[in-house]
Amino acid sequence: MSNKVKGADGKIYKQVTTEGESQNHSRTAEMVLGIMGGVFGIIAGVFSFFLGGIDSAVSSTSSSSLFGLGIGCIIASIVAIILVCMINKNRVAMGWIIIICGVLNIVFVSAFGILSGALIIIAGILALVRK
């Protein structure tokens, strides 16, 4: 790759960069979407705790599965937030793991995790698509 640069003497020079040189790209969109999705995922996990508590108070069976799924959603959301903050290290690997966290959010808390999962998945896709 080469860019044209004007020198101090007024002449135009070619600035050559190699493929190995990393250019620092702004990953603000991925970070904002990922953090918002993670926060909404934590809220969805806490909401599933309340739903599990109400279910155990009303029914005679225990609803420890909702408690476990809420914990899973909160853990996946925290992992997504941490990975989004480190997205400049290795964007491809982080992007795939962020997408997996978004899918897990939707799987764990179903309808409550659709918003958070969608935001996290979009952040992961942006990390993969943008170079």
Image: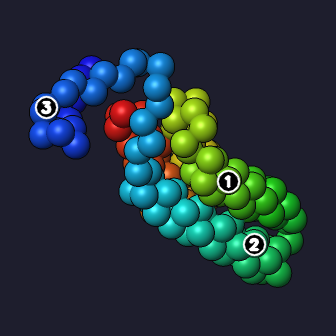
Label 3 and label 2: CA atoms lie apart by: 64 Å
Q: Are marks 3 and 1 in contact (CB under 8 Å)?
A: no
Residue 78 in sight in this render: yes
Q: Nearer the viewer, mark 3 or mark 1?
A: 3
Residue type at mark 2: give it: Phe
- State which tag comes first along the sequence, 3 or 1: 3
Q: In screen coordinates, is 64 left or right of 128?
A: right
Label 1 and label 2: CA atoms lie apart by: 23 Å
Other-residue count near label 2 (Cα within 10 Å), few / some / many at <14 / 14–19 / ≥20 = many
Q: In screen coordinates, is 32 left or right of 40?
A: left
Task: Check disc 3 and report its element: helix, strand or loop.
Answer: strand
Report the front residue among 95 and 16. Answer: 16
Other-residue count near label 1 (Cα within 10 Å), few / some / many at <14 / 14–19 / ≥20 = some
Q: Return the residue at label 1.
A: 82
For the point 27% across and 27% down, which residue is it?
15
Q: Position of residue 20 (x, y in %)?
A: 47, 19
Label 3 and label 1: CA atoms lie apart by: 44 Å
Residue type at mark 1: give it: Ile
Q: Return the residue at label 2.
A: 49
For the point 74% across and 55% down, which residue is it?
75
Query: Against 123, is 10 above or below?
Result: above
Q: Return the residue at label 3.
A: 12
Residue type at mark 3: give it: Ile
Q: Position of residue 114 (x, y in %)?
A: 47, 58
